[in-house]
Image (cartoon, rainbow, N blue to C red):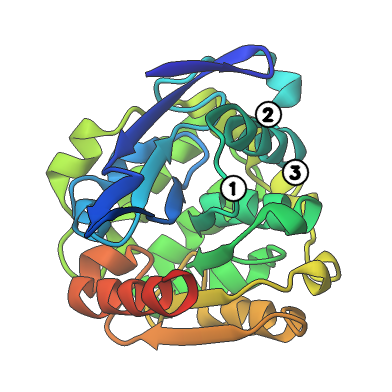
Amino acid sequence: MRILINGVRLFVDIEGAALVPEGPTMRTKPTLIALHGGPGADHSIYKPAFSQLTDLAQIIYVDHRGNGRSDDGNPDLWTLDQWADDLFALCQTLGIEQPIIYGASFGGFVAQAFATKYPDHLGALILAATTAHVEFETIYAAFTRIAGDSAGHVAHAYWSDPNPERRQAYFENCLPHYSVTPPDPDMMQRMIVKNPVAMHFNGPKNEMGRFDFREALGNVTCPTLVLSGDQDPIMPIAFSETLLACLGNAPVTDHTLQRAGHLLNHDQPDAFFAHLRHFISENTL
């Protein structure tokens, strides 16, 4: 469905019931909102794997404005602040209270923008393969270490000064190293890729190089789960260590998945979903 939020129609998909019968009562399940990476990707990266969580939570998938099946709107509003406001307005429109926000990679940036701006409206937070502040030199070094000099050079060229040609080279030479196991070609075929929003956001000269949630994360007090992969070239373990250091006022659980790259649920699905299930069960039921 497409819902009018802050002047644009956002694509939203809902999986699982919010109310389930339990003896003589109706039990309310928590709501898990899944925020996709990118920018320039869409929510389809989570399907069908996240369906296995519907016994614990109702799942809301949303494409950020400018991404996937959502309206583009004004490019000037392709900002973390606006994406956070869209998420808050969506919760208000749907009557969602105290959701669990799951954000991976760029989705984790949006999740942090929401969590630091609207901390009282958050039930729990899951940050996977993401960072509070992008240190590009750390990314270049990780690509070189994990994928070799050639991939390191291509990553440096793209992230230091993105353009369409460098983005295509990055997709061909670096994206295959996002996972330790062979990437799923069907996932890439299903995904709607919007390059303009990526060009608008990516790189040190754009908001990707300016945002910094390190201090503001001190305002987050809800239960938080931080997940990372030991072979992630784009969001290296050092980024998760920074998250943990900044979340000093929240009860935090963290796990580094071994033999896992950026696509945690693809490389280590059993461990990944076991951690999510335990966290959701412990903090919402």
Q: How far is the residue under mark 3 from the one under mark 1?
A: 29 Å
Q: Residue 16 appears in which quarter of the rendering? A: top left
- Name the residue carrying label 3: 207
The residue drawn where x is 36% and y is 72% is 276
Which structural element holds mark 1?
loop
Q: Secondary structure at mark 3?
A: helix
Against 117, residue 248 (above or below) is below
Q: CA distance from mark 2 to mark 1?
A: 25 Å
Instruction: Of the two numbered discs 2 and 3 on the same chain, state the one appearing first in sequence.
Output: 2
Residue 226 position, x and y percent, is 52, 76
Residue at x-position 53% and y-position 66%: 127
Residue 73 screen position, x and y as percent: 63, 13
Q: Amino acid at mark 1?
A: Glu
| Circle 3: residue type | Glu
135 sits left or right of 216 in the view: left
Is 96 situated above or below 195?
below
Residue under circle 1? 97
User: What residue lies at 69% left-to-right and 19% top-to-bottom?
Assistant: 6
Question: Do we see residue 145 in this rendering?
Answer: yes
Question: Contact (CB < 8 A) between labels 2 and 3?
Answer: no
Label 2 sits on what residue type?
A: Trp
Location of the N terminus (image quadrant) = top left
Q: CA distance from mark 2 to mark 3?
A: 9 Å
Residue at which label 2 appears: 78
Label 2 SS: loop
